[in-house]
Amino acid sequence: MAGHSHWANIARKKSLIDAKRGKLWSKLAKAIIVAAKLGGPDPDANLRMRYAIDAAKAVSMPKENISRAIRTGSGELKGGNLEESLYEGYAAGGVAVLYEILTDNKNRTAPEIRKIFEVFDGKLGATGCVAWMFQRKAVARLPADACTEDRLTELTLESGAEDVRLVGDRWEIVCEPQSMAAILTALQKFGISDVTSDIVRIPTTSVDVKDVNEARKILSLLERLDEHDDVQSVAANFNIPEEAMAQIG
């Protein structure tokens, strides 16, 4: 899934570097609010809260912002009237797109998202049209120099790890969401505390996109979705061969 990974890298750099930290913090605050609302404020008892706080800390979101979001979701502060939805659609070339939304006004958000799809030759789909093409997994990430692959595999396999892989300068441990707490505990017992975790949607199959124009439209669509204030996460099932990526630049 080289193409998908390439887009993920673009999105990550955009979020952290391109002077959009305020917008990113706003999105993360929404995730924390909903996590607190659904499962309570304690990250030890609410794994979704743990994921949301980890994501916020990873981009240096101020502690007071995190605390305010938790208090809002817990009902101590006013606000937090957010609805969560999972939307599905197709990008150019029939690529499946799955994205999560948190919004206080679906009537505003839905047409805005539809317009983004239309601009880049995509279309929204009915519920269930592409969700079956993705698996919901949890991913823990830690520095590559924190542990060897053999030791990391040994530490986490019995706790439910399905895959251990090196991505850039970090190890990624993939597992079912319900196994993440046990894996984090195993890492902490070994003295590894610099760990972040989140939930991702991993495609079970991918579409090879060899047409450069289609590839550009797909990447542009995903970036525009990621920029939308109400879109929390985006997943897609495509691969762009190196030859095509070289032409895109």
Image: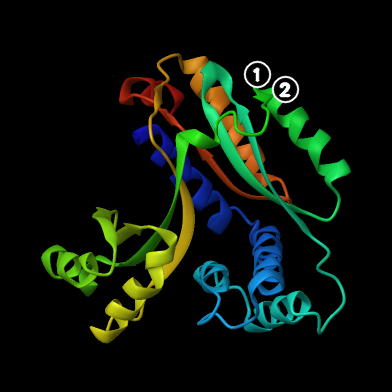
Report the residue at 35% width, 81% height from top: 193
Which of the 4 image quadrants contains residue 49?
A: bottom right
Residue depicted at x 65% and y 69%: 35
Judge whether 118 appears above or below 16 on screen: above
Query: Mark 1 is on which residue type?
Result: Asp
Q: What's the residue type where badge 2 is placed?
A: Glu
Residue 121 disc label: 1
Tell whether 152 sits left or right of 39.
left
Residue 129 in percent (x, y) is at 59, 28
Residue 37 image offset from top left, x and y in percent: 72, 72
Q: Describe residue 178's horizontal placement relative to residue 106 as left or right.
A: left
Asked if marks 1 and 2 touch (Cβ < 8 Å), the reply is yes
Quarter the C terminus occupies:
top left
Return the residue found at the far left: 150
Residue position for label 2: 118
The colour mode here is rainbow
- The span from disc 1 to disc 2 (Cα, nearest Å) is 5 Å
On the image, the x and y values in percent for residue 225 come to: 65, 40
Q: Nearer the viewer, residue 65 or 128?
A: 128
Q: Residue at x 20, y 72 (%)?
A: 155
Image-based side of 228 in relation to 111, left or right: left
Helix, strand or loop status at disc 1: loop
Would you place residue 148 above or below residue 102 in this image?
below
Q: Is residue 65 left or right of residue 136?
A: right
In percent of width and height, residue 96 lies at: 53, 29
Dot 2 crowding, Cα within 10 Å, few <14, some 14–19, many 20+: some
Total marks shown come to: 2
